[in-house]
Amino acid sequence: MSFDTPEEARDVAIERLEQFGLSTYAARTFVALAGLGTGTAKDVSRVADVPRTRVYDAVDELQSHGLVDVQQSTPKEFWAISAATTGRKVEREWQYRADELQAALDELQPVEQSEEQRGVWTVSGRKTVTERVVEFCENAEDRIVYMTVEELLTGDVVDALEAAADRGVTIELAGVSPDVQERIQEGVPSADLFESLWMWSDTPAGRLMMVDGDTTLVSVLVDGENGQPTTPESETAIWGSGETNSLVVVLRAIFTWRLDDD
Amino acid sequence: MSFDTPEEARDVAIERLEQFGLSTYAARTFVALAGLGTGTAKDVSRVADVPRTRVYDAVDELQSHGLVDVQQSTPKEFWAISAATTGRKVEREWQYRADELQAALDELQPVEQSEEQRGVWTVSGRKTVTERVVEFCENAEDRIVYMTVEELLTGDVVDALEAAADRGVTIELAGVSPDVQERIQEGVPSADLFESLWMWSDTPAGRLMMVDGDTTLVSVLVDGENGQPTTPESETAIWGSGETNSLVVVLRAIFTWRLDDD
DNA sequence: TGAATTTATGATTAACTGGGTTACTCAACT
DNA sequence: AGTTGAGTAACCCAGTTAATCATAAATTCA
């Protein structure tokens, strides 16, 4: 990780500190002190673009987080803890918060984790869709059928498929291009490859997956309605789960020739 | 980690999600959905205390973070990703932010990391003081002299001392009570123990440390001016660094009998 | 088919946090 | 004493966001 200019590093640091929960004055003050090592209110005010009279508030805030020590003299001088210490501190705090969030949500999670029978859910954004695909792979118990275009076959997906294969899940894959097939063969040797079922290449196709015959996901690469070029964010998917789920029923019908084939 | 009541878990989850960057409506909506699994705007509004008409905005926000999927029907139905997935997602995001912050601060860190010669810095709060102590231990190269009262001898400190000892740093320790000495002996076998130098027990003493003869820290347990009971947060310390630092000079004079003693 | 109810979206208002400024006190130095 | 600079505190203003209201779409039921 690196930054083009010192200004960029400065801005990123300020933004992250604000996300940590600091006021913008406090964030700017800390970054200024991090650069200076130590400094007075006047020094900070000059380089941090913080009104001098508010530097004291900002330092109070930083002090309460243990990020700055002060020298009781006139003028007061302020000292920022090192970058390494700050990083460790923030990382630990965030780790703690994440753990606590996880625990709290676990507590609240409804008992009945029954598969939804009805409903077709929509997801948009390539990253989000990939997350769903990976999640379904993780929950697969028997068989995954997966078709994809090349540009959507990222490492995440291959890894998830591989992990499923290792658990004994049957993987059946189809890709549009020989390239894709090759890459899959590499990542998931045990996968059973088959050719695409129908004209797939000239559609704005994305992926198509069926898990254990009761969960399915279909995605397309949409360009909006105005025909702008495909952006990484333009994938939209729908998915459904449950033996009698309508999307599942339809997709299973389409796949039947293949699923009953062995 | 666990929670006394479901309400507490709910509140904690909401708070953490807000810290993650969500609006309070979005946070409340997500927590409601996490409990429900799926639900309509009306459902959410009932259990989440969010105006029904605002649920849609909240869901938009959540959707953009990939935390919920929606069912395009009337009424719309919303589905929250699982607690486990949420936890992983948030954790990964925060980890990333922490790394980036660290990198940015490293970039900004001043070249001259010269030891400060003048200045006596103050730190307050037991946790913060402990951090300073640990930091000094980590930077120690030759010798650490450390005195402490029992209640401040936490695992962090013992670990840091042990790590320093393993690096070949000479450790000289003094505690007020036999108990403390015993525990130190356990944790840091190579430490050289000696008795307290002067009347220490009847003062509001905290800790006293000298590192490599050029960095020193003294703390006391203050009860405020009103005589309220000692809280965990009531420790105040001062520290200084540099051969000619005034605090160092004074403390070194006091310690001389011991430091020159071998 | 049409009235009534429910749902969704947009516009509007209110409250509050927080950034920015100003005024004032205290201390030191001229 | 007057001046300058440091530190403290109070105030004001604006942007954000929570909350309300109004309107349009749609579904239900008569």
Image (spheres, coloured by chain):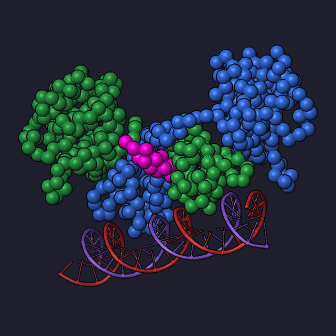
Chain colours: A green, B blue, C red, D purple
Is A8 covered by the magenta stretch? yes
Residue B79 visible in rendering? no
Q: Is residue B58 above or below residue D22?
A: above
Position of residue B230 measured from the top left corner of the image (x, y, whole percent): 81, 46
Position of residue B98 measured from the top left corner of the image (x, y, whole percent): 48, 41
Question: In the image, is A251 to the left or to the right of A74?
Answer: left
Q: Residue at x 82, y 15 (%)?
A: B262
Which residue sits at x=49%, y=41%? B108
Instruction: State the quadrant of the N terminus of chain B.
Output: top right
The residue drawn where x is 53% and y is 39% is B110
> Is residue A114 found left or right of A143 in the rendered image?
right
Label the magenta part by its dominant secondary structure.
helix
Please state which of residues A242 and B21 is positioned toward the viewer in this rendering. Answer: B21
Please provide the residue range marked out in magenta: A4-20
Residue A96 vs residue B121, the one in the foreground: B121
Q: In the picture provided, is B223 more to the left or to the right than A67?
A: right
Residue A57 appears anywhere in the view = yes
Measured from the top left, where is residue A30 in percent x and y? Answer: 56, 48
Percent position of residue D29, x then y: 30, 74
